């Protein structure tokens, strides 16, 4: 506002000051409203914020008379002045502050409505979450109760029925999870501006657990159905296989008789025909090998489940019969081939050696194949590796025998060329042995490579999980040692907060450990290694504990912040003892205190004792002479605030201790309280029976705000604070004048009109607040400033 306009319309200055104070307070309130965030899903946090919003709305309504007074004053100013510029400015400012008031009120009401909706939505989500977690607990209990039982069709059918029923129940119970997810999605979507981490993490955990459960149930159902199908098919397959064995035995007997005929080797055509028939038989034997092994394996499982019953005895006989016939059939086949390929004693010996080697190579290859697949945990793979080492030692032991036999065959073929059947079959047989030997070695090397890689990765995984588990346990031990926030001493809140923040910093690198463990698990999956249930459970446990640890630390920090804010050194909590019931000391968003009377359900800015003091000061209005009356009021105020005990030097020391040298700088409520606390702590040491620190600090703060911050913006200038304290301290008037003049003087010791005006303005506020300003020339200090400089001829450079 132009200074010329202020000179022309002096009353505009008071209007402008009141307008600025109210505008600043509204702006601060609006910023506070927009900056407040709550933990979505935390009912206690939301309820607390709702109470704060309610208190803020009450605070706003209590200030409405101030707005109405400002509007009335503006209307009176417009009526009294003919200056069109002044009238325009007044109109504009009133419209702006009315719009600002309406916006702040609307923001408050919308936020309160949003918080109420958030409370309702969070309550519904928490209830749905509890139901979903109960369902997950029930399903986990059922899964854990499942055990391996009898390997019979009835038992498997019963398990299938149970599993299908559980799968059916899962489809019904999924509604609980879906409801929790839908409500969580609503919270995440509708309240994204607030803190939604709790909802996000809990929802992720529920969905991950549900997916894992569904996978386990589906896999079990599929495995049981496959087992049931095999069990149903087993008797039919066994009968079919035994029937084939009977036919194959007949064929083998006919061939065997034919190969023992005299002069067979001289009939090349007959030998070729018999060899072709033997190859057909051998082809059928090889084609039925897997069938035989499957029947034998499944039969052994069924036998174990039927142990002690008559059915077990009968089945054992049939399996023994099948094994015997199968063994005899293979022997006959080998015998037939031996006879067909025999040509001489030496050739027979070589042929027999090659045949034995081929059988041994095939058996070893089968043995090696049965070691697969690679195990899913380190101990299992370690056992597989031990078996493989023994297998390799066996290969190394057999290698000289195979090499010697092949070398002998090669020499025999070179030195004594064969004719007839010998020449047809001896050399290919040796090549077959050599090929199978190389194949077996490659197979063994490839399996060893897989085991080595798996061992390396699984050992790395085990070391990584052990390291992560240890670090998590250490952090969990620290977390477990935390006292409930409500049990902590107020003075220790900051220390605890720093320790929890330090723990958060210490566990931050664990995020890389968790990622490393999960990456290792993924790499094993890529390699085709299916992790064991033990390892999978460890991974799930570590990931869950990591997430829960993060949530717990963030939640504890939030609780400590809240407690520190409400009860810590900067919380004004120690001032709550300055009032007694039914009164309660409360704090507005800009830290300004106000007082609630729970009996009358009313609030006010003044401390109850301050109200009593003002009432007693009103009794002095009967004193005739204004100077005496004002002096008596000041003395009573001084003694009530215990400032009659404060020396000027002590006041200066306290101000210097808090570095209050920039007189134009504002002081907020906490800075004022800290400075006053220093002053009254000192006075309490000297006058323990006279000074109640919380009461004195609160009363003096109340008085300073009534004098210099009637709009309760929560700020006063340093010069105003000094003027109020020094004016009422214990010192000679001349010493007070010198100190206060020094605060506004320049470095050369001179003071200009503006600085003197500031000092006089702050000084006149004290009698104004006491209702005595009219006796001292009113609140307009311009004439006093002009009179001071009327005869001054020196102007400092």
Image (tube, rainbow, N blue to C red):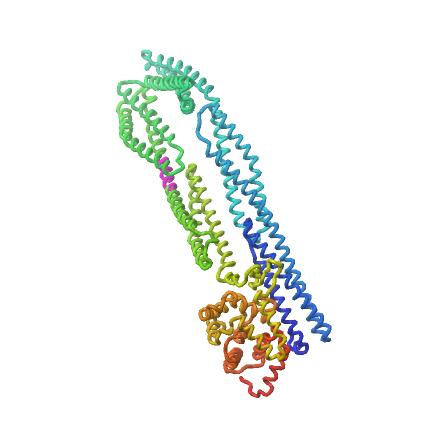
**Where's residue 612, x and y in %?**
59, 67
Q: Which residues are magenta?
A: 445-458
Left or right: residue 511 versus residue 612 is left
Q: Number of callouts in the render?
A: 0
In this view of the protein, which residue sits in the foreground, 197 or 609?
A: 609
Q: Quadrant of residue 638?
A: bottom right
Which quadrant of the view contains residue 132? top right
Secondary structure mostly seen in the magenta stretch: helix
In the rendered structure, does residue 625 fall within the stretch colored magenta?
A: no
Magenta residue check for 454: yes
- Residue 217 screen position, x and y as percent: 50, 33
Estimate the x, y position of residue 326 in percent, counting from the top left. Answer: 38, 19
Q: Is residue 19 left or right of residue 351?
A: right
Q: Is the residue 434 above or below the residue 83 in the image? A: above
Q: Is residue 209 above or below residue 234?
A: below
Q: Is residue 214 above or below residue 493?
A: above
Name the residue at 40% across, 33% down: 373
Residue located at (56% from left, 43% from top): 127
Q: Position of residue 671 (x, y in %)?
A: 51, 67
């Amino acid at each position: 506002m132009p200074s010329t306009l202020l000179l022309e319309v002096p009353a505009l200055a008071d209007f402008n000051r009141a307008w600025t104070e109210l505008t600043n307070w509204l702006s601060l309130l609006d910023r506070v409203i927009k900056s407040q965030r709550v933990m979505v899903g935390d009912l206690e946090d939301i309820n607390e914020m709702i109470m704060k919003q309610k208190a803020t709305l009450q605070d706003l309504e209590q200030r409405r008379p101030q707005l109405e007074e400002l509007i009335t004053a503006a209307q009176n100013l417009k009526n009294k002045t003919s200056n069109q510029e002044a009238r325009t400015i007044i109109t504009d400012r009133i419209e702006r502050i009315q719009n600002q008031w309406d916006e702040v009120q609307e923001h408050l009401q919308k936020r309160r409505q949003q918080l109420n909706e958030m409370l309702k939505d969070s309550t519904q989500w928490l209830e749905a979450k509890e139901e979903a977690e109960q369902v997950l607990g029930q399903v986990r209990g059922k899964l854990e109760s499942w055990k391996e039982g009898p390997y019979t069709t009835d038992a498997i059918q019963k398990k299938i029925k149970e599993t299908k029923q559980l799968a059916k129940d899962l489809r019904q119970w999924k509604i609980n999870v879906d409801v929790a997810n839908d409500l969580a999605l609503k919270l995440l979507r509708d309240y994204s501006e607030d803190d939604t981490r709790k909802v996000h993490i809990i929802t992720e955990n529920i969905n991950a657990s549900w997916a894992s459960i569904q996978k386990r149930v589906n896999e079990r159902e599929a495995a049981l159905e496959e087992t049931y199908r095999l069990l149903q098919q087993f008797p039919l397959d066994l009968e079919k296989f035994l029937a084939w064995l009977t036919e194959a035995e007949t064929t083998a007997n006919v061939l065997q008789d034919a190969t023992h005929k005299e002069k067979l080797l001289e009939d090349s055509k007959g030998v070729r025909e018999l060899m072709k028939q033997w190859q057909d038989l051998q082809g059928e034997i090889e084609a039925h090998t897997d069938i035989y092994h499957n029947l034998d394996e499944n039969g052994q499982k069924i036998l174990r489940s039927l142990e002690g019953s008559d059915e077990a005895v009968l089945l054992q006989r049939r399996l023994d019969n099948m094994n015997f016939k199968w063994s005899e059939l293979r022997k006959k086949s080998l015998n037939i081939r031996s006879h067909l390929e025999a040509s001489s004693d030496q050739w027979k010996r070589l042929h027999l050696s090659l045949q034995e080697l081929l059988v041994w190579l095939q058996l070893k290859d089968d043995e090696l194949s049965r070691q697969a697949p690679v195990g899913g945990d380190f101990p299992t793979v370690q056992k597989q590796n031990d078996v493989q080492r023994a297998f390799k030692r066996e290969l190394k032991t057999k290698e000289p025998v195979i090499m010697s036999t092949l070398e002998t065959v090669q020499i025999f073929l070179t030195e004594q060329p064969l004719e007839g059947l010998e020449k047809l079959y001896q050399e290919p047989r040796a090549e077959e042995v050599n090929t199978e030997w190389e194949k077996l070695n490659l197979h063994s090397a490839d399996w060893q490579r897989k085991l080595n890689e798996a061992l390396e990765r699984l050992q790395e995984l085990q070391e990584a999980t052990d390291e992560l588990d240890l670090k998590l346990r250490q952090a969990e031990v620290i977390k477990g040692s935390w006292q409930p926030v409500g049990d902590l001493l107020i003075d220790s809140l900051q220390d605890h907060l720093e320790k929890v923040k330090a723990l958060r910093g210490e566990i931050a690198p664990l995020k890389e450990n968790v990622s490393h463990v999960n990456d290792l698990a993924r790499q094993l999956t890529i390699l085709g290694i299916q992790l064991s249930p033990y390892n999978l459970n460890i991974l799930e446990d570590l990931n869950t504990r990591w997430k829960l640890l993060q949530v717990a630390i963030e939640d504890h920090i939030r609780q400590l912040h809240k407690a520190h804010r409400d009860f810590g050194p900067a919380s004004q909590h120690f001032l709550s003892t300055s009032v007694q019931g039914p009164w309660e000391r409360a704090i507005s968003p800009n830290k300004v205190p106000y007082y609630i009377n729970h009996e009358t359900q009313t609030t006010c800015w003044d401390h109850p004792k301050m109200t009593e003091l003002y009432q007693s000061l009103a009794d002095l209005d009967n004193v005739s002479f204004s100077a005496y009356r004002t002096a008596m009021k000041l003395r009573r105020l001084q003694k009530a605030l215990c400032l009659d005990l404060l020396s000027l030097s002590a006041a200066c020391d306290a101000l210097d201790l808090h570095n209050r040298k920039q007189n134009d700088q504002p002081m907020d409520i906490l800075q004022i309280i800290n400075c006053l606390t220093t002053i009254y702590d000192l006075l309490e040491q000297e006058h323990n029976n006279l000074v109640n620190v919380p009461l004195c600090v609160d009363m003096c703060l109340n008085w300073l705000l009534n004098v210099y911050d009637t709009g309760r913006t929560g700020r006063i200038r340093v010069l105003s604070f000094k003027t109020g304290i020094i004016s009422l301290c214990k010192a000679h008037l001349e010493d007070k004048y010198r100190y206060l003049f020094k605060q506004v003087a320049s470095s050369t010791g001179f003071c200009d009109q503006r600085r003197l005006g500031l000092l006089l303005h702050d000084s006149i506020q004290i009698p104004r607040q006491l209702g005595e300003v009219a006796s001292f020339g009113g609140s307009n200090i311009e004439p006093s400033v002009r009179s001071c400089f009327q005869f001054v001829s020196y102007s400092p450079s």
